[in-house]
Image: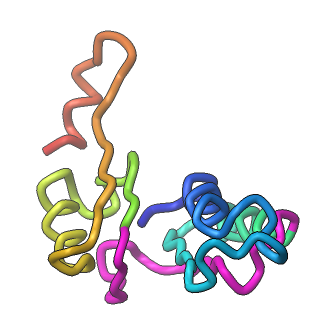
Amino acid sequence: MGCGWGELLLRAVERAVGSNPVVDDRDSRARGVGVDTDPVALERGRALARRRGLEGRVEFVHADAATWSGAAERALCVGSSHAFGGSRAALEALAALVPHAGRLLFGDGCWPGSTTPGCHGHLR
């Protein structure tokens, strides 16, 4: 959710299917859907998926992550809480997408150094 060009998504699907998706089929059901509002980033993700042999396994959807109504056994959202209106809203929305036994990787609000007052505004 809020995937940009989907590097994390592509790596997760690659890991699930093995290093060569055509030959090493660890999990033939492994699929990924990346959702973002940036058409340029999504096209870059599609090109990367083709280059890595992941066509048919990874789909990039031009949509607002906060209103996307799909479901996922696993969801990844790193650095995109702003798409939902903040961390709390993101976690609530993501929890609704993932079933009880599913998995969610959520990362947000990490800086290597001191933050500025402007950084705090989008964490509410």
Residue ID at (56%, 85%): 29
* Quadrant holding the C terminus: top left
Per the image, is 34 magenta? no
The residue closer to the viewer here, 86 or 54, is 54
* Residue 65 left/right relative to 93: right
Quick check: 70 above or below 117?
Answer: below
The answer to whether residue 5 shows anywhere in this view is no
Above or below, 112 against 18 in this view is above
Q: Quadrant of the N terminus?
A: bottom left
**Res 81 quadrant in image:** bottom left
- Camera-side residue of 123 and 18: 18
Q: Position of residue 31 (x, y in %)?
A: 57, 80
> Is residue 74 in sight in this rendering?
yes
Q: At 20% across and 53% down in the image, what residue appears?
A: 86
Using the image as rendered, state which of residue 79 and residue 96 is in the foreground.
Answer: 96
Q: Is residue 59 magenta?
A: yes
- State how many labels appear: 0
- Residue at the far right: name it: 51
- Residues 12 and 69: in front is 12
Residue span colored magenta = 51-74
Q: Quadrant of residue 99?
A: bottom left
What x and y, as percent, mark residue 117? Answer: 22, 21
Image coords of residue 46 (percent x, y): 75, 72
Q: Is residue 29 left or right of residue 75?
A: right
Q: Answer with left or right where residue 100 lies relative to residue 25.
A: left
